[in-house]
Image (spheres, rainbow, N blue to C red):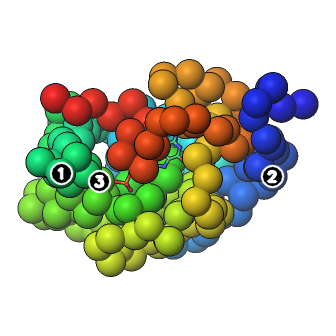
């Protein structure tokens, strides 16, 4: 059963099945290697928790928090790290675990930022991909599902800080809010 006002998109069993498939791919690709799973707070933590429990390779986790700036015309154009990784990543395999890639601006910034630290490898795993709004070209190694231009909540994804606890992903009508510039809990200083 989905909550009033939320239309079911990906029910729990579908998410669990896809997470298992992604983990199987990752187990295969990183066989015999160690990997650091890097997640951007806060949306990706539920996906990370499920994904890592399906991994058989040796892995550790680390977290980043990002802040989005509105540029002069109101568009979210620039991002910066507000909470950095706790540990160095030089010469290590890094897998970014994301909830959703939308414009790709956040990840584009993150990839550049992390690449400067000279990891052994850097790949991206995202549960959801909305390619229609992509701005910079990004290579997404592991993608759970493609979605279209609807605002989604649940399974870690929020609307005004709420709904992260839903075990499924659903569509919500964000009303008058322009979610294309107001997504998630990212702060605008
Ligand atoms: P991007 O930089 O790719 O435009 O933004 C990605 C971030 O925007 C995601 O990590 C997520 O926090 C937020 N986001 C984008 N689309 C949605 C959505 O449909 N629902 C929610 N809750 N957050 C979204």
Residue lying at 16% horizontally and 29% vertically, measured from the top left: 189
Residue 135 point in image, percent of width and height: 32, 71
Q: Nearer the viewer, mark 1 or mark 3?
A: 1
- Mark sitting earlier along the chain (1/3): 1
Mark 3 Cβ and ligand 1 under 8 Å apart: yes
Residue 104 point in image, percent of width and height: 35, 62
| Side of 108 where 149 appears, left or right | right
Q: Secondary structure at mark 3?
A: helix
Disc sitting over residue 73 in the figure: 1
Q: Secondary structure at mark 2?
A: helix
Q: Disc 3 vs disc 2: Cβ atoms closer than 8 Å?
A: no
- Residue with the mark numbered 2: 14
Q: Disc 1 vs disc 3: Cβ atoms closer than 8 Å?
A: no
Q: Nearer the viewer, mark 3 or mark 2?
A: 3
- Residue with the mark numbered 3: 106
In the figure, 2 relative to 40: above or below? above
Q: Nearer the viewer, mark 1 or mark 2?
A: 1
Badge 2, how many Cα within 10 Å: few under 14, some, many 20+?
few
| Side of 111 where 18 appears, left or right | right
Does residue 38 appear in the picture of this structure?
yes
- Mark sitting earlier along the chain (3/2): 2
- Mark sitting earlier along the chain (1/2): 2
Foreground residue, 39 or 72? 72
Residue 47 point in image, percent of width and height: 57, 42
């Amino acid at each position: 059963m989905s909550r009033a006002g939320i239309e079911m998109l990906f029910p729990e069993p579908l998410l669990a099945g896809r997470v298992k498939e992604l983990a199987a791919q990752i187990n295969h690709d990183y066989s015999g290697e160690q990997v650091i799973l890097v997640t951007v707070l806060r949306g990706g933590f539920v996906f990370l928790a499920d994904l890592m429990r399906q991994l058989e390779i040796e892995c550790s986790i680390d977290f980043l928090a990002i802040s989005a700036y509105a540029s002069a015309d109101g568009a979210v154009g620039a991002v910066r790290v507000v909470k950095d990784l706790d540990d160095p990543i030089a010469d290590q395999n890094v897998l970014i675990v994301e909830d959703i890639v939308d414009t790709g601006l956040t990840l584009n910034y993150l990839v550049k930022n992390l690449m400067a630290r000279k990891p052994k490898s850097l790949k991206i795993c995202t549960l959801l991909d909305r390619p229609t709004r992509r701005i910079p070209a990004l290579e997404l190694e592991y993608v759970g599902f493609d979605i279209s231009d609807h605002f989604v909540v649940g399974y870690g994804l929020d609307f005004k800080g709420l709904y992260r606890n839903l075990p499924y992903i659903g569509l919500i009508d964000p009303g008058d809010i322009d979610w294309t510039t107001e997504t998630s809990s990212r702060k605008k200083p």
